[in-house]
Amino acid sequence: MEASGQATAITVSQLNRRVKALLEQGVARLWIEGELSNIARPASGHLYFTLKDDSAQIRAAFFRGRQRGGATTGLKNGDKVLAFGQVSLYEARGDYQLIVEQVEPAGEGALKQQFERLKKKLHADGLFEEADKRPLPGLPARIGAITSPSGAAVRDVLSVLGRRFPLVPVVIYPAAVQGESAPTELIAALDTAERRAECDVLILCRGGGSLEDLMAFNDEGLARRIAAARIPIVSAVGHEIDVTIADFVADVRAPTPSGAAELVVPDCGDWLRNLAVAETRLLRLGQRAVESQSQMLDWLSRRLYAGSPARQLERQQDRLRIATGRLLAGMHAELSGRRRGVLTLRGQLLTASPALAVQRSLARLAAARRNLAVAGRNWLGERGHRLALAARALDSVSPLATLERGYAIVTDVKTGKILSDARKARTGDTIEARLASGRLRASVDEALTDET
């Protein structure tokens, strides 16, 4: 037996592991209600505590990774809480414990569970369908408020309604908004409002509070009565973060009572501005209509006048004036053409006149004389100039010019020939020397040559 016992033995770790698996698989995650004690907050951020009642206790661990939004901040020893989690085993010590995922105060937690159950039930019954919601009237003739007549919520509603659209009257249907009788009174107020049928929209409202304070609006009977109402209902319970069953079944949910008042009536300032715009548009349309009718009247008046005898006479007079104008214009044009023809013929006649030909011939003769005189003067001037040049050239080679320089022309008186060679003269020949001025006659005493 000892050998057999040793062969089938397991370790403590294996045992605790099996027990842990059995606990986690055999016991589903659940809510446990109890009192907090032995709270420990180590530096790791985890929260360890004991959850107990009058006769038993269980260790619990709320790890930091599962804590959301400061869920453990206000917890203290002695608090009654609801802890949601998984039953498990801490293998290192073999301690049976609860791994916590969520902690809520005990009373509120139960109310939340009740709230969630009713919400699921009514949702399954179709009371939350958006298709069944009724639209709010654009401008209600009268507004009903189902609320406590002494609460702050009704004062907020009346204040906002008076500011936004003071002309709309408000009827208060008093009812308790907290306590055991509140759901019955709220249903009775809603019945009264529908029986009297004096309002176009109802505001179901109250101020903020705890979940327990708002439980009257989580009543199933009230929810079904709201869903069956014939008048559109705006739910405005608590603050914006508060949510009730009435919000889901009402036709419209407002975040606050003041917000509900803003939803049910328009802003009179916006209406006045829109009215001013509409008035301006209406005036423009009226002006356009008047202008259009005026144009039509003018057109009809012109048509009527166009068919009248006076207008016919005016048209005939207009045609007569036009024909007269055209006739006069034609006559002026014809006369102008004839006048231009006469002037042309006169010009041609004057061009062919003998007197004009004689005048042109005399003019050409005078011009020819002038040209001849100019040409003669030019010719004589040119010839004179050329003669002067020739005279100067001739004078430069003239013997007389040589004589002026002291030379003489010697001729043989007997033969009359010019002696240019002394050897041709003989002693005793008479010679004549012509000077620049006068002559000299002489007898040759001796003929000298260059060699002598």
Image (cartoon, grey):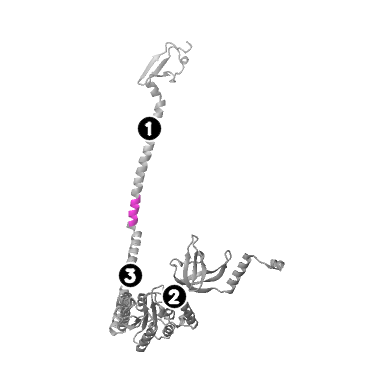
Q: Which residues are magenta?
A: 356-364
- The answer to which of 199 and 338 lies nearer the viewer is 199
The Cα atoms of the two marked residues, 2 and 1, are separated by: 158 Å
User: x, y (%) of residue 423?
Assistant: 47, 14
User: x, y (%) of residue 271?
Assistant: 32, 76
Question: Badge 2: how crowded within 10 Å, few (<14), some, or many (20+)?
Answer: some
The correct choice, above or below, for 363 with respect to 262 in the image is above
Q: Amino acid at mark 2?
A: Gly
Residue that carries the numbered disc 3 in the rendered image? 333
Residue extending farthest to the front is 1
- The answer to which of 170 and 78 lies nearer the viewer is 78
- The answer to which of 309 and 232 lies nearer the viewer is 232
Residue that carries the numbered disc 2 in the rendered image? 107
The Cα atoms of the two marked residues, 1 and 3, are separated by: 73 Å
Check residue 32 for magenta coloring.
no
Which label sits on residue 438? none
Answer yes or no: is residue 142 visible. no
Residue that carries the numbered disc 1 in the rendered image? 388
Q: Who comes first in sequence, dot 1 or dot 3?
A: 3
Nearest-to-viewer mark from 3 and 2: 2
Q: Amino acid at mark 3?
A: Ala
**SS at badge 3:** helix
Question: Badge 1: how crowded within 10 Å, few (<14), some, or many (20+)?
Answer: few
**SS at badge 2:** helix
